[in-house]
Amino acid sequence: MLTYTLKRILQGIVTVWFIATATFVAMHAVPGDPLANQRATNEQIQRNLEQRYGLDRPVSEQYVVFLGGILRGDFGISFTQENRRVNDIIRENFPVSATLGILAVAFAALGGILFGALTALFRDRLPDLVIMFLVILAISVPSFVVAAFSQLALVDINVYLGFSLLPVAGWGTLRHMIVPSMVLGLGTMAYLTRLMRSSMLEITSSDFIRTARAKGLPPARIFLKHQLRNAVLPVVTVLGPAIAAITTGGFVVELVFAIPGLGRYFVEAVQQLDYTVIMGTTVFYGAFLVSMVIVVDLLYGWIDPRVRVE
């Protein structure tokens, strides 16, 4: 188990290095001046700014400094936010994104398990057809489109009721979190529904299910204890990457709903060519995703020894 753990950690470190390198190369290949928003009034001020941010050094030296900062856990200073470090931006705003992501994952997991079980239970009947149609729709429509239509629907509902049932935007209370978390988790819920349905149908035709029926066990007990319990294992498998993907994938949703999460700063950094914020948040998100995948792999390696052998 120790060899397997060390191997997965080494693979994760190499993956994070590749993400950091690819991000650095991409940022320096993008046309434009990252200091254009600083409005330097003369060449001397421009040179001073380049020296402050290390842009006067050769690209190879900038790359070494960038990797050294990552090893120390220092992503540098923002180009557009005066004297503000990228670490501070991540520390102050990632908890908001994480809270939104956890709620979205909870919504996606519960909905995926419930609707997946229902579609398998009512296979090829009306509930199955309706749910699968909605699943395909949820997978096909981008989250920013769903977010925009959700806001329009909330406005109409609030106007019709004469009071604010749920806030259209903002952050701070549980009422502000409900709609954004549902919008963010909708695509993952649809994917988990399909996965749960396939797993349920496979379990239904298994020998131990036929044996349980032949022994005369009640259908409710067979469904809950044997079918649902075994069919949910593949869903648990993908929850680790799903948590990371949702937590790091709410950029547009946060922007649409005016949520002060890390995604909003990433979008603004892309618009303003803020190299340090873009590279810092990308590496942070990449490391978070890789860590979640490693945790799931280690858990599976502990549960199933065949994974370690492979």
Image (spheres, helix red, strand yellow):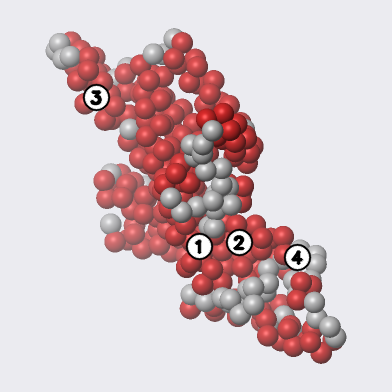
Quarter occupied by the N terminus: bottom left
Nearest to N terminus: mark 4 or mark 1: 4
Q: Residue at x 48, y 78 (%)?
A: 72
Amino acid carrying mark 4 in the image: Ala
Q: Name the residue: 79% across, 87% down.
A: 45
Nearest to N terminus: mark 2 or mark 1: 1
Q: Please report whichever mark, 4 or 2, sits nearer to the chain's N-terminal start.
A: 4
Q: Earlier in the sequence, mark 1 or mark 3?
A: 1
Q: CA distance from mark 4 to mark 1?
A: 28 Å
C-alpha span from label 4 to label 2 = 21 Å
Residue receiving disc 1: 93
- Left or right: where 207 falls relative to 102: left
The numbered disc on residue 29 is 4
Asked if disc 2 and disc 1 are in contact, CB closer than 8 Å, the reply is yes
The residue singled out by tag 2 in the image is: 265
Which residue does the numbered mark 3 point to in the structure image?
A: 224
Amino acid bearing label 1: Asn
Local SS, label 4: helix
Q: Are marks 3 and 2 in contact (CB under 8 Å)?
A: no
